[in-house]
Amino acid sequence: MQTPWAVILTKFNDNNNEPFPRLRYEEIFTPAGAGKWNMVDYFRDMSHGKLDLSGSQVFGWYTLDKATADYTGSGLHQAGRQDLLQWAKDKATAEGVNLGDFHNVVVVLNSGRDLFGGLNGVVCGDDGANSALSGLSPSLLGQEMGHGYGLNHSRREGSTVDYTDPFDVMSTDAGRSAPHPVYTDLDLFGQPVYEIGPGLNAANMGSKGWLDMTRVWTDPRTARISTTVQLRPLHSRHLPGYLAARFGEYFIEFRMNTGWDALVPPCVLVHRFEGGSSYLVPDEDGNEVFRAGSAISTPENLSVLGSGFSIRVNAIDTANEVATVSLARAPAQIPRIFPQEGPYQTPWIKWLEAASLGEAVVILDGKAVSISPNSPAYGILENVAMIGNSHPLMSERLQTSIREEAMANIARLSQTEVSMPLFRNPATSLHRKRGGGFENGSS
């Protein structure tokens, strides 16, 4: 997919500085810098080769009819930011640039006045003095241009706070960026001005259709599965094998401390995508990265009937750049703990007839007790199950909402007047024939 960007070099009318030779900007944004860790390289790798930015062009310098003080944009003043984008677009259009030929625009200022991105365009800049992190750094541009493709900031599971996935470019503020291999400028504190990475996670890639699905292990969605998958590093298309796995709602990826991910430790990461954002899912011990032995699985209170899933990392082989992951899912199983006494020795009969009548069966002290669907106790049990089945990987807000609703229902049902007995012994009631008498026993 060709998505060229128009790069507009822009000055305010009270600052005539041109910080770098034009070639620097062309090397960062166009094929003139191919192989030099630029934005053409980055989005090609982050889209498994699906995005082609090779048609990007640099225009300017253009001087706005505005002074630096006229700019009022900031994170709290989005209108001012949109004004700046429009000023630059209008100026470029007046100079004969057809912006309709481009996917989006990057406005490059001759100062570090602001840095932001969105569907309407990107603004960045650098005064050339190496006094702070450069808005021309590919790590920062990866995030801002990512916004230009419609990506949102990434998050950690259980929170709606942005910038909380340090292994994803859409959380660059918390990210693991590495020094640029080509542009090695240092700031006044000896820190690199230009940085690269980290890469884009598989959930964000999948949300834009950028995953090469021929290189993704895909869940067959069968009721029962137990398999082992070997993963290559997510962005290493030159290596054979799977680059990611899609299991249920989860995106599973292997990351190595190479390339754009130079500061990412060898690990497996698990994400899911919801409401326009990716969420980093920790392992069952709360660790944000999965190492050998790390896992998540359905907690015991969610698998009373034997159903559930598990994701487990078996091994990470850094020498051969392979991670081995076990994936499993099991369907619900019928409990086998019914009382083995009296004339009804077969637990399956009790269970199946209860199910056919729409009744609930509860195991109390090893004895099976059935509850009629017409009784308030049945409704109470439904709400108890709702509380017990609130998935720990749900957001905290959703879990709280489920618990509050269920507790309110339980309180209401507990006050309901009933005239029928709530509990019956399945050894007699469950097996009464609908026409009278009993099956498999004395009448």
Image (cartoon, rainbow, N blue to C red):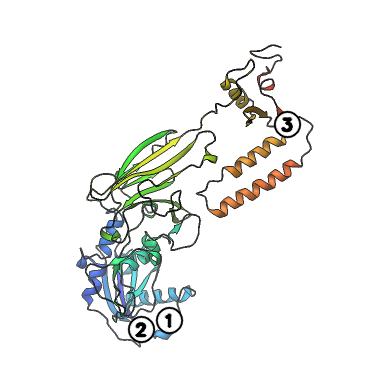
The dot on residue 179 is none
Mark 2 in CB contact with mark 3 (< 8 angstroms):
no
* Three-letter amino acid code of the residue under disc 3: Leu
Secondary structure under the numbered disc 2 in the rendered image: loop
Residue nearer the viewer, 341 or 25: 341
Residue lying at 62% horizontally and 25% vertically, measured from the top left: 354
Residue at the far top: name it.
442
- The residue that disc 3 covers is 422
Give, as a three-letter code, the residue at label 2.
Phe
Q: Disc count in the image?
A: 3
Q: Where is residue 146 in the image (x, y as percent from the top left)?
A: 37, 62
Q: Is mark 1 on a helix, strand or loop?
A: loop
Q: Which mark is residue 71?
A: 1
Residue furthest bottom in the image = 14
Picture coordinates of residue 279, whole percent (x, y) = 44, 55
Q: Distance between the residues labelled 3 and 1?
A: 72 Å
Discs 2, 1 touching: Cβ within 8 Å: yes
Q: Decide which of tag 2 and tag 1 comes sooner along the chain.
A: 2
- Residue pictured at 28% horizontal, 71% vertical: 194
425 to 330, vertically: above or below = above
Q: Is residue 291 shown above or below 143?
A: above
Calculate the distance from the C-alpha at mark 2 to the C-alpha at mark 3. 79 Å
Name the residue tied to disc 2: 12
Q: In which quarter of the image is the N terminus?
A: bottom left
Tell me if mark 3 has few (under 14), some (14-19) or many (20+) residues whose alpha carbon lies within 10 angstroms of its own: some
How dense is the environment of label 1, judged by Cα within 10 Å: few (below 14), some, or many (20 and up)?
some
Q: Where's the C terminus, which quadrant?
A: top right
Q: Can residue 207 be seen in this view?
A: yes
Q: At x 46% / y 63%, what residue is drawn? A: 162
Would residue 23 be found to the left or right of residue 330 on screen? left
User: Which kind of residue does numbered mark 1 sit on?
Assistant: Tyr
